Amino acid sequence: MTTQGEAAKPLTGRVALVTGASSGIGEATARALAGAGAKTAIVARRADRLEALARRIQDAGGEALAIAADASLESEAERMLGEVERRYGRLDILVNNAGIMLLSPVAEAEIADFRRMIEINLFGLMTLSRLALPIMKRGGAGHFVNISSVAGRIANPGAGAYAATKFGVVAFSESLRREVYKDKIRVTVIEPGMVATELPNHIANPGMRAGLEQRKAAMEPLEAEDIAAAVLYAVTQPPRVNVNEILIRPTLQER
Ligand SMILES: NC(=O)c1ccc[n+]([C@@H]2O[C@H](COP(=O)([O-])OP(=O)(O)OC[C@H]3O[C@@H](n4cnc5c(N)ncnc54)[C@H](OP(=O)(O)O)[C@@H]3O)[C@@H](O)[C@H]2O)c1
């Protein structure tokens, strides 16, 4: 509720859930949505980071609910949506952002890393979307924002499995959009190029890490806030506008 003289923020009255909010793009997006007035549930496995972010949002006058959970698991997806419904009674915006990027040439890859990436980048996103749909339908509208990547458009050597998950996000999102648009539920895919975050920290392959560092040094990477601004743009358009896709690269990134 806004007090007299205070202008309503664009997302006042809306409820958002952001996965992977303990760092990088998810953290910046959660701050942007909460700053725009959304009650924002934040999900990741690192509880301490989530609690610190929730405090930061609350100190800035926003509303946040920290839920420590593994977003790759169906039971955890059910639990987090249950907590959101109990606390806020609805869900308007789901930002499926949690992800990992374990780059390696196929010949050197750990098979377990294929599974880990598929489980969080793709299976988790699909599962949470499936379980969130009835909640959005009950609310009469909704908005999925799925974070893919330039790697969802172009498969570079060393990124086969990661790109497969991100191509999968694009395919799933387009199919979902065509199923739910009549329910006034919108679907947006965001495809960032290189963003300065913790994402490369989990790459074990030394050649891939060095190559990525070299590419990064040759360009000014995007900031997490640049992607958060794209998310905010998509979710603050009038109901008639369905922003389906935003591909956003650093100026100096060629492909
Ligand atoms: N950085 C880039 O250049 C870039 C480019 C294109 C697309 N993207 C995509 O952007 C998204 C966010 O990545 P980022 O760059 O912001 O990297 P990041 O700083 O490493 O953030 C990844 C987030 O995902 C969370 N996460 C990972 N596995 C999880 C799980 N099983 N359950 C819940 N949360 C989990 C991490 O939190 P916990 O570890 O605390 O769980 C963290 O909050 C990813 O989908 C990534 O593929 C990034």
Image (spheres, rainbow, N blue to C red):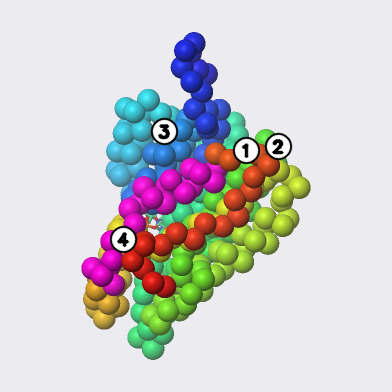
Q: How far is the residue under mark 1 from the one under mark 4?
A: 31 Å
Q: Is residue 39 visible?
A: no
Are the residues tagged 1 and 2 within 8 Å (C-beta)? no
- In the picture of the structure, the residue carrying the numbered disc 1 is 238
Residue at image location 41% in from the left, 33% down from the top: 35
Q: Any mark on residue 221, and which?
A: 4
Disc 2 C-beta below 8 A from ligand 1: no
Tell me which corner region of the image, top left, top right, bottom left or bottom right, holds residue 251.
bottom left
From the image, tell me which residue sits under label 2.
140
Residue 217 vs 63, above or below: the answer is below
State which tag comes first along the sequence, 4 or 3. 3
Identify the amino acid type marked 2: Gly
Alpha-carbon neighbours of circle 3 within 10 Å: few (<14), some, or many (≥20)? many
Real-space Cα distance between discs 2 and 3?
Answer: 24 Å
Work out how far the residue at label 3 is from the one at label 1, CA to CA, in angstroms.
Answer: 18 Å
The 10 Å Cα crowd at callout 4, few under 14, some 14 to 19, many 20 or more, is: some
Is 226 in the magenta?
yes
Quick one: SS at disc 4?
A: loop
